[in-house]
Amino acid sequence: MGNGIYKLDQVLAEPGDKFKLILEVDGVNYLAESTVIHPVEIDSISYSYYEGDSFFRPGYRFHLSLTDPPGVKNYYRIRVFKNKYLFNRPNDLVGFDDTDNEGKTIKVNLHSQYYLETGETVMIELLSIDRQAWEYFTTFADLVNTGPDSPAPANPVSSFSNGTLGYFYAWSYSRKLVTVEEDGD
């Protein structure tokens, strides 16, 4: 696509399939690999209106519930879209794993406010990702959410070899559409 962004459209993949990207730059190879993980279904989504405060504007906050499959370590990322627009601010990056929730119901509160009007629809995706992608997203979120008293930031954990910064990942997903009404709970 340009500017170091590569994208394959309409690739049919099954859980367990492995993808590999090899880049050669000035005679040096850079390798990244990712495995497609079984998708996990979203059980339910609710939302509530947040009145706002001195730091945040009013808006809707979403809450989703999923049942973590037992017997396997799972890693997740959540994406929220409005009219095909991905909310992609630093606070919108939500990645988590099933630590302490193995085989249980996991409830996730999305703390970003989504500025929607009554009758508008959002799509929420639950991505099942591999550990390497999860490490990148969680360390990147740590980096962008540092405060003035935080220690010096470090680069996120890259999924590429040879010390190259970046990420490459394959995923499976489940998604639900939600139409905002007066009372979401």
Image (tube, rainbow, N blue to C red):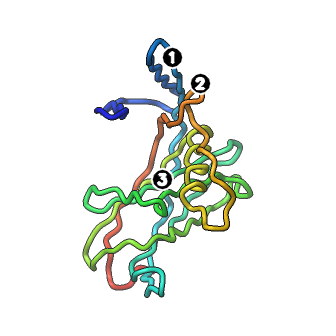
Tell me the quarter of the image containing the C terminus.
bottom left
Q: Could you say where residue 141 lies in the image, as x and y percent from the top left?
A: 56, 55
Q: Earlier in the sequence, mark 2 or mark 1?
A: 1
Mark 3 closeness class: few <14, some 14–19, many ≥20 residues within 10 Å: many
Tell me the quarter of the image containing the N terminus.
top left
Q: Is residue 117 left or right of residue 91?
A: left
Question: Label 3 sits on what residue type?
Answer: Leu
Looking at the picture, tell me which residue is in the foreground, 96 or 24.
24
Q: Residue 162 got which mark?
A: 2
Q: Could you say where residue 129 lies in the image, as x and y percent from the top left?
A: 54, 42
Q: Residue furthest right?
A: 100
Residue 46 figure quarter: bottom left
Q: Earlier in the sequence, mark 3 or mark 1?
A: 1
- Give the vertical position of 135 relative to 23 (above or below): below
At horizontal 50% and vertical 44% (from top left) the residue drawn is 39
Q: Dot 3: what SS?
A: strand
Q: How many marks?
A: 3
Query: Which one is closest to the eye, mark 3 or mark 1?
Result: 1
Which residue in the protein does label 1 denote? 29
Circles 2 and 1 in contact, beta carbons < 8 Å: yes
At horizontal 53% and vertical 49% (from top left) the residue drawn is 40
Q: Residue 120 got which mark?
A: none
Mark 1 closeness class: few <14, some 14–19, many ≥20 residues within 10 Å: few
Q: Is residue 60 left or right of residue 9?
A: right
Question: Label 1 sits on what residue type?
Answer: Asn
Query: Which one is closest to the eye, mark 3 or mark 2?
Result: 2
Residue at mark 3 to residue at mark 1: CA–CA distance: 32 Å
Q: Dot 1: what SS?
A: strand
Question: Label 2 sits on what residue type?
Answer: Asn
Which residue in the protein does label 3 denote? 126
Q: Earlier in the sequence, mark 3 or mark 2?
A: 3
